[in-house]
Image: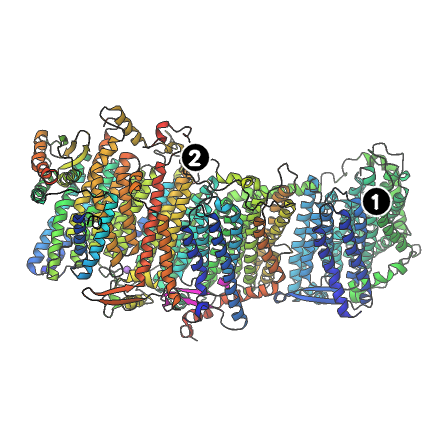
Amino acid sequence: MELVLALGIGILTASGVWLILRPRTFQVILGLSLISYAVNMFIYAMGRLKVDAPPIVGSGAVEASRYDDPLPQALVLTAIVISFAMTALLLVVLLASRGITGTDHVDGDDGE
Amino acid sequence: MSIATSSVTLWFVLLLPFVGSLAVAGLPTRSRDAAALIAGAVALAGTVLMAVLYPQVANGTGLQTGVSWLPSLGLDIILRLDGLTWIFAMLVLAIGVLVIVYARYYMSPRDPVPRFFSFLLAFMGSMLALVLSGNLVQLAFFWELTSLTSFLLIGYWHQNESARSAARMALVVTAAGGLCLLVGVLLIGKIVGSYDLDTVLASGDRIRASSLYLPALILILIGAFTKSAQFPFHFWLPHAMAAPTPVSAYLHSATMVKAGIFLLIRLWPVLAGSEAWYLIVTSVGLITLILGAWAAIFQQDLKGLLAYSTISHLGIITLLLGIGSPLAAVAAIFHTINHATFKASLFMAAGIIDHEAGTRDLRKLSGLYRFMPITATLAMVAAAAMAGVPLLNGFLSKEMLLAEALEETNETLLDQALPYLVTVGLIFSVLYSVRFIHQSFFGPPPTKLERRPHEAPHWMRLPIEVLVLACVVIGILPAVTIGPFLDVAVRAALGGGTPEYSLAIWHGFSKPLLLSVIALVLGTAAYLVFARALNAADAVPLLGRLRGRRMFDAVLSVLVSSARWLEDWLGTRRLQPQLRLMVLVACAVALLPFLRHGYAPGTAPRTLIDPGFALIWLIGSACAVAGAWQAKYHRLAAVVLVSGTGLASCIGFVWLSAPDLALTQLLVETVTTVLLLLGLRWLPKRLPDNWPGKRTPASVVLRRGSDLLIAVAAGAGVAALAYAMMTRPLPDAISRFFLERSYAEGGGRNVVNVILVDFRAFDTLGEITVLAIVALTVFSLLRRFRPARESVRDPEQQRLQDAFDEAHAGRAPGDTVSDYLVVPRIILEWVFPFIVVIALYLFLRGHDLPGGGFAAGVAMSIALILQYMAAGTRSVEARLRVRPTDWIAAGLLIAAATGAAALLFDHPFLTSWFHYLEVPLIGKIPLATALLFDLGVFLLVVGATALILIAIAHQSIRRPVRPLRGGEETGVEKR
Amino acid sequence: MSGGWAGHLIIAPILLPLVAGAALLLLKEKRRTAKRGIALGTTAALVLLSVLLLTRVARAGFAGDPATLVYRIGNWPAPFGIVLVLDWLSALMLVLTSCVGLAALIYAATRWDQAGPRFHTLFLFQLMGLNGAFLTGDLFNLFVFFEVLLAASFGLLLHGSSKARIKAALHYVALNVATSLLFLIGAALIYGVTGTLNMAHLVLQVAAVSDQDLPMLQAGMAILSVAFLVKAGMWPLGFWLPRTYAAAAPPVAALFTILSKVGVYAVLRVPLLLFGAEISRTAGAAQQWLFFGGVCTIAFGIIGVLAARRLSRIAGYSLTISAGTLLAAVGAGEGSVLAGALFYLVSSTLGVAAFYLLIELVERRDAATAVGGEPVFDDEYVGLMPIEQESEVGVVIPASVAILGGGFAFCVLLIAGLPPLSGFLAKFAMIDGLLDLRDTVGAPVWWLIGLIVGSGLATLIATTRAGIDLIWAPSERPQPALRVTELLPVGLLLGICFALTIFAGPAMRYMERTSQSLGDRHGYVEAVLGPEAAGR
Amino acid sequence: MRRWLPYPGLALALLLVWLLLSQSLSVGQLLLGSGAALIGSHAMAVLRPPRRRRVRLAPLAKLGALVAIDVVRSNLAVAAIILFPRKGRVSGFVRIPLELTERGGLALLALILTATPGTLWVEYDQRKRMLLLHVLDLIDEEEWATLIKSRYEVLLLQAFEA
Amino acid sequence: MTTLALALAITAAQILLGLAVFCAFLRMAWGPRAQDRVLGLDTFYTNVMLLLLTFGIQTGRTLYLEAAVIIALLGFVGTVALAKFLMRGEVIE
Amino acid sequence: MIQAPDLPGWAALIVALLVLSGAAVTLVGSLGLLRLRTFYERVHAPTLGSTLGMALIVAASIVCFSVLRGRLSVHEIVIALFLTSTAPVAFMLLARSALYRDRRGDV
Ligand code: NA
Ligand code: NA
């Protein structure tokens, strides 16, 4: 399972990196989204994998090893929110750039 | 006078010019007299006080006083007054007085004269501080300050281009030298272990023996040579003649250019005496002497001639110092004083000529003697001193120079050739002195002048008279007049190595005298022969092409153009190379540790493959690849595929025990999709084909290939890292704490949520602030948004559909969309309350089960967006007044206030409190401040998400102030 | 937590701007005076606060007591909750931030704050982000505050939107989003290996990492460092910096001078803290890379300064130079060099900030074009009035050229590191320290010294080329209309530098202590986790 | 009553959803759910001010049963089409004039038709009261029209417009 | 024994659903028209939701159903937006 | 992960059958997405999953949790309710858009 997850993270990253190296703004924004997915999963993976062990505890004494590591999950949540915000911002900036320069090239001109 | 009083006096003398400078700067622009008066008083007071201090130095003890400045680095402000500094300080102050008097009459009342005197006083203060420095770093400090103040003085008439460029050149050259000097003295300091001048002067042997000696020497010499206009840094000085003449008289005869000389003298005991010193300093001095003199001959500008002669005479002094014998050093100090007197007076005379004749061109000047006999006489005497005519002070030091040149110092060829070359230089010197006098004062009356010259006002002549008198008196009675002072200075400068010397006029018939006579005769003869040819010269023969300024400009422009080329080559303004570099660097640096230590996956037991998860996750990855493939030409397809990836990762999170993440990601995913689609409306429909009908250029293919490689490398790297980490055992550090305390101390079962709103609520506070900021930014930016011209109009679909409605009987515009949405709209309206309830549900249960303020907020805003999609902006806003900014403010304030409430109980910020309240019938209800905090999160998220989405959506209903040109009429009118 | 209200002062630099900024959102767009008043009051309070905190640190530190103050947010014990750590360096950065912030805000309050909506809130949030980043003692919280300050910087960069700003912002946002992802990867790796996020706890955990986990940790740290270095503007990762800053509105650019130091600060904080010389198996190479990276950055900065056609680009590249200098000084690994570099950090930040403000005054002619002309849409934001129409502050200072020229000259001196301002002392201190390394490090020390000297010269050459003609050349245009409130901030910044020059002794002593404290891992751990954890 | 509780039926449904989600009938959840339902129904009222209207439940119940049977049948039919494609099957659009005008009824009809595999509500022309339906296995247009009108529309008319 | 059988059945069901998702993916990737891709995405959502239900059964936890509820209630929003974009050229008018 | 809750045999059987058949129906529907020729035909296919497929799996879930907890557990009904009322909206909007795109200018 670790291998599958790692593979997927790698593929997502590679696709994202390919996209952020493209010249069109929309490609860049999608690329960053893809890398965000990969990074979120990556952060999660730093707490190692546990299937069916959600960190939702009972009221008694807690056997920590029976639960998935909650901290990376909390970090991913923060990261999700922030990357959503940044995607929104980047989108609006690229719209503004497209409006003011007339092109959707990342450098504001159509030179390839 | 006690030492203490003397110290105070010394400080007073030093600070006086600076204070005066500030005072004068505050005067009104036109107050020439007041400015001159203050400046003169300051300088005079300084001179008098400095003279009063003479007894302190006369007995050889000197005076030292200091304040601590940067003690840890050995930098203190130390004023150190000894014979040498006294004489330099006197030069600075006394000639300062004369120059100020002269300048009062020289400067036009239309100039902002107070500024001039302010700069002059600041320069005077810097120069004083320089010579009085008892610390090498302090010396370098004030050294640069003299460069700066002289820059201001040279650029005083900044309306002239020549003044600006001259000032700049002088600044760049001397400041560069100053920086070298700084490093040089730092090296000396490192050798000695102190920057204190006394310590340094006592460590000559150590310094010369050090391996750092040569670099230090070279750096210090560069500093000295740039300041003293020595070859090859001499070129700035002639251009600095663009300064008002009093500035030239002051800076370029007596003070600033002498700073370099002062430095060489000051450090002579520790730096001189080596072969390197001899070779460098002597040859530079010699070259400067000859070159300067040669160039002076061919000058047509009076001040130019004086400038080159200054260079030449500075060369003489440098040469003397280079020879390295104590006697030569004595001669150097002596000539420094002499040169200051005759050159200052010559500059002033030149200024008077310029004033009266309206030109400084030697070719236009002639026979001025009859108009201004006194000035002419004074100038003649000074020029004679410059030429080395006996009975004048210049003669004495010149004799000493010749004597030292003839002395056999060492075996080098340079030493052998020295007497001859010096004599050649002196011949030139006589030649230009004679030319200066003869061309301006003798001959027929001038014809090319615009006005009739007069004798200058008496007060303007007075400074020249004083200086010329000094030339004569020193020249005739050296031992009585200058003797004691020189002696004190020489002792202070040379310390124990002070030689026996005599200041007599007559040393009998000697070789130096012979050479002197030869120089005088040949020089005069040469003038007689070549006078006419000289007047016709446009450039300096042999050196014509070596125009300093042109070379300086060329060097700078080469510097700038190569910098521009390098900037293009080493840098980039494009985004893609920057991102490429970032990825590459990150890959490379992450690879390094593995190259050294090797890569190995961990040994922890692997989790069994789960086919359901594996399938979905791989499909998600495939979506990513497909999305990347489609993103350029099929944006919508790419959005769809990327959504697929997002969904797959949600499922992954569910599977991997992270239901909170799944929920949040799912909700965010939805909003993001809507967002991207909102954006797509403003992007160009179809991309132009970059290479229509042609094959893609090889360079592009290559770049794509390399990008692919980079992408694969990055992906592989991240995957390898993730795999290696997942297969290692989890370090047991802080997570256990959260699991164990979540319920007992955080009051919640959902540990992730408790972390977010309690353990690490501070992160969440920051995170919602980010969201708030982004929303505000988006809103602000869109308030000034201008879409591209072709996007302003309604989308093509809408125009076609409206046109269709209009064209068909029984239809009204808008029917198509109305029919399209009628049924969905009803359903979506009924869905709205359900989403609201779900949002509330997610919010309330978040502390115990997956959910929470963020998820609830996003769900709520999706409900809102759905209504916007179904009913349109205007229609929704007619019924629903959303004020997102207020929501944002409320959210932030509630969250912050919840955290701050703890402060009232003297608990740290964000300390949580919870309590299970027993209510009859209902049972235990948890009351927790964390819930309040989460409420803030909820409000903010609703506000921010709504603000972003609505701000973008509103772009569609904006109306241009007037119809846009180029936009079609149908496009700008909205229903 | 004891100590009454004074004990809670550490949180105030974060909380105060947050609350004030949020409260400003409740005020309508039209209530400009109230907004200005609140924002200025808050920023001024921040200056007082930060000075208070700095004196607390300095007083305790110089008296020999522990200078580091730790604040446990949420009252959770140290490695588990988030802590704020106030020490020599963070106190210094707080003061610097608030001073530059106040100057920039006073300047903006004359007219620039009207160039777009919600300026004051964004500005205060920017200060909050900066203060948070300087105070936090938690790796992930550092990320969060990085994002806060970045988000605010996006908003401020776009303030008064113009073509140049939007184009620059597109690159800036894209690069920074990518950088943030690197930050996350790096931080996650570090967490994966050590299982903790608290920096002090990390110091202990890093020391205990097994050999087989070491490369993972190093990879994480390397990726994290790349993220920091992008933000610091190191060559070849920092090409965005000069262009972005040049595009920003002047007061924003002035504030951004602090922003450019955050990356360096993070390098000082995280990698240096975790991978200090104590842990020999991890240190050496990284510091060398930092050194050479810094050297290359200075070299590129020099090239850029010389190549620059506009003053604002010169200012941007001098930030590059200053970042490079700091990085190289950090890489040199010598306390006294670092102390000098910190002194340089302070004076160059103040100098460049003042320079950005002055540039606009000097080039005022172009100022009106920044706003973008006639509105196109009926609801478009129109805020910034041309200078002539405004009558609020209307004092046109006579002899403005002379004042501008003087200010300009002082800025140049400060940036180039020439006397009589503090830049010179800083360069002197650095070179002085570097010369002590000549035997241990060898030739590279000379390169660095050469570059430090050369950068000053290059700055001088470039600024005089552009500045002399701009200020001194006679011109047809009328004397620029300046307001006292626009000169005041420049004077404020330069005045601080002047004070730094006069009181160089105590100031340098502070820097030396700061530099020492950065090397004192043990003290840091002890302050945050208590003496037992530190193993004393 | 209306002011305090607009859309009582909706509120009830919302409360039901709440209780279903929380899997509890405790007093606390009842209270919370009622609060949420209240908020939800007010939200709806903001969006669309409630109008007095009666809906008969009996025809709707009958309709529900019919639909359930039809959905299962159509599922099997469509599955067969997918798994065993036969030659000559035609799909196409059918225009059906509707008498039903009540919005709720129309929405319900749209849901039913679309949710039933094999038929798809494409568009409704409000002026002509004409429904455009897509049918996967179109044998006879007329037959489809009568089927829908007699089987569903009648019941809906009874429920909403009587 | 029955538990194992059930486990196998659930796993088999998950594989079937996974294949169903794969079909949806192919439609998303191939198109050919935009509407086909959107339809694929919508199917993706539905199938994934069903997969979550099976996962809930498998683990015996109702915890995971929340995600399914959210998909059921909000999964169509993306499709609505996409469809509206195709029809009208913008999502919100 | 191959696991299942510990159910009595009969319940396990019912759940297994329901789940398998639900999944199968859904798969058939999704297969239709691939096999049907035109877009308008394909729109019908996923309905299988969102109606019968969903119903069967929801039923399985209800049975499973009711047995597990020993009381009627029907909260999956919410899912059925929501999906039935939202999925058709998507389909009808999408189909209409497709129709417009296919017959642009001649609606
Ligand atoms: Na985990
Ligand atoms: Na159907």
Q: Tell whether B243 sits left or right of C472.
A: right
Point out the image quarter for the C terminus of chain B.
top left
Q: Which residues are magenta?
A: C67-92
Picture coordinates of residue B955 (x, y %)?
36, 38
Q: Tell whether B504 sits left or right of A111.
A: right
Figure check: B1 above or below F10: below
Q: Is residue B649 visible?
A: yes
Asked if the magenta segment contains residue E34, the reply would be no
Picture coordinates of residue B368 (x, y %)?
88, 38
Q: Tell whether B727 sits left or right of B492.
A: left
Point out the image quarter for the N terminus of chain B.
bottom right
Q: Tell whether C155 sits left or right of B250.
A: left
Label 1 crowd bin: few (<14), some (14–19), many (20+), radius 10 Å: many
Asked if the magenta segment contains residue C80, the reply would be yes
- Label 2 sits on residue: C376
Residue type pointed to by label 2: Val
Q: Chain of mark 1?
A: B
Picture coordinates of residue B178 (x, y %)?
67, 54
Residue B260: image tag: none
Single out the mark in the foreground, 1 or 2: 2
Q: Chain of mark 2?
A: C
Picture coordinates of residue A112 (x, y %)?
42, 37
Q: Nearer the viewer, residue B78 or E28?
A: B78
Residue type pointed to by label 1: Ala
- Label 1 sits on residue: B349
